[in-house]
Image (cartoon, helix red, strand yellow):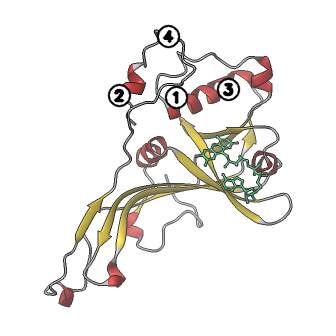
Amino acid sequence: MEPSKRSEVRRLPERGDYDPQTINSILDEALICHVGFVADEGYPVVIPTIHARSGGTLYLHGSPASRMLRSVKNGAEVCVTVTIVDGLVLARSVFHHSMNYRSVVIFGRPREVDDPDEKMRALEAVTEHVAHGRWADARLPNDLEFKGTTVLAIAIDETSAKIRTGPPGDDDEDYELPIWAGVVPVATTFGTAIEDPALRDGIEAPGYVTDYRR
Ligand SMILES: Cc1cc2nc3c(=O)[nH]c(=O)nc-3n(C[C@H](O)[C@H](O)[C@H](O)COP(=O)(O)OP(=O)(O)OC[C@H]3O[C@@H](n4cnc5c(N)ncnc54)[C@H](O)[C@@H]3O)c2cc1C
């Protein structure tokens, strides 16, 4: 995918990646995104929210009363970011401290999803993004719930990934310093599921809960 003028990584461009497979894998692994937009009232806001990808489309969902969804569906441009932190990079010099990360930035103008089939598939994608296998188990939305949910779609076509991996990069003269340097790996882990105190007797946790992974 060719970057646009505003999606081209200019600072450390060798860390930029425009391969849709790379971008998709980061979007799919990240639990949430941050949506930046200018609210109807005229000031900038950045709001955390769940996202899901299906093909080349990113979906957001929420209440029709959400100021975020209202502002954005009125034609506001958005900038969506996702970030996965993989490590703390401790260099010998303060200056070269960094983090290992995989992040994506998407620019776009969302459209509201009106088509009932696409909307249902988008809700499936959002549910499956959170827990793969859940859509087949949970009660599906009824008419009221379906109408009471706004779904927005953003084409993933003006986008970039930026990725840092590996050890610190110190200045040549600093490698002789008696200072520890390296990377502290960072990973998201999922704990043992805590069952709802109101759970009916005899219901076992499904495999995607007991063995949750992304
Ligand atoms: C992990 C996570 C997942 C979420 N997933 C979704 C989702 O899928 N769909 C959805 O609609 N919402 C989701 N939310 C909630 C979302 O962040 C917003 O609170 C919600 O969309 C309402 O937005 P609004 O602009 O209408 O809020 P408003 O209440 O109109 O916002 C007014 C002000 O409240 C403050 N505010 C709003 N939200 C937050 C927040 N999350 N944290 C701190 N201050 C805040 C800000 O100052 C904001 O300017 C999620 C939040 C988190 C943290």
**Mark 4 neighbour density, 10 Å: few (under 14) some (14–19) many (20 or more):** few
Disc nearer the start of the sequence (1/4): 1
Classify residue 59 as left or right of residue 41: left
Camera sees residue 85: yes
Which residue corresponds to the image point at 50% horizontal and 57% vertical from the top-left? 160
Residue 201 circle label? 4
Q: Residues at badges 3 and 1 in contact (C-beta under 8 Å)?
A: no
Q: Residue furthest top?
A: 202
Q: Disc 3 marks which residue?
A: 118
Name the front one of labels 3 and 2: 2
Which residue corresponds to the image point at 54% horizontal and 18% vertical from the top-left? 199
Q: Disc 2 marks which residue?
A: 211
Where residue 166 sits: x, y (%)?
26, 64
Q: CA distance from mark 1 to mark 4?
A: 26 Å
- The answer as to whether callout 3 falls within 8 Å of ligand 1 is no
Nearer the observer, 189 or 67: 189
Report which quarter residue 204 is drawn in.
Answer: top left
The amino acid type, in three-letter code, at marker 2 is Asp
Report which quarter residue 165 is drawn in.
Answer: bottom left
Where residue 173 sits: x, y (%)?
19, 90
The amino acid type, in three-letter code, at marker 1 is Glu
Which residue corresponds to the image point at 71% horizontal and 38% vertical from the top-left? 62
Label 3: element kind? helix
Disc nearer the start of the sequence (3/1): 3
Disc nearer the start of the sequence (3/2): 3
Q: Residue furthest front?
A: 197
From the viewer's perspective, is residue 173 above or below residue 23?
A: below
Label 1: element kind? helix
The quadrant of the picture occupied by the C terminus is top left
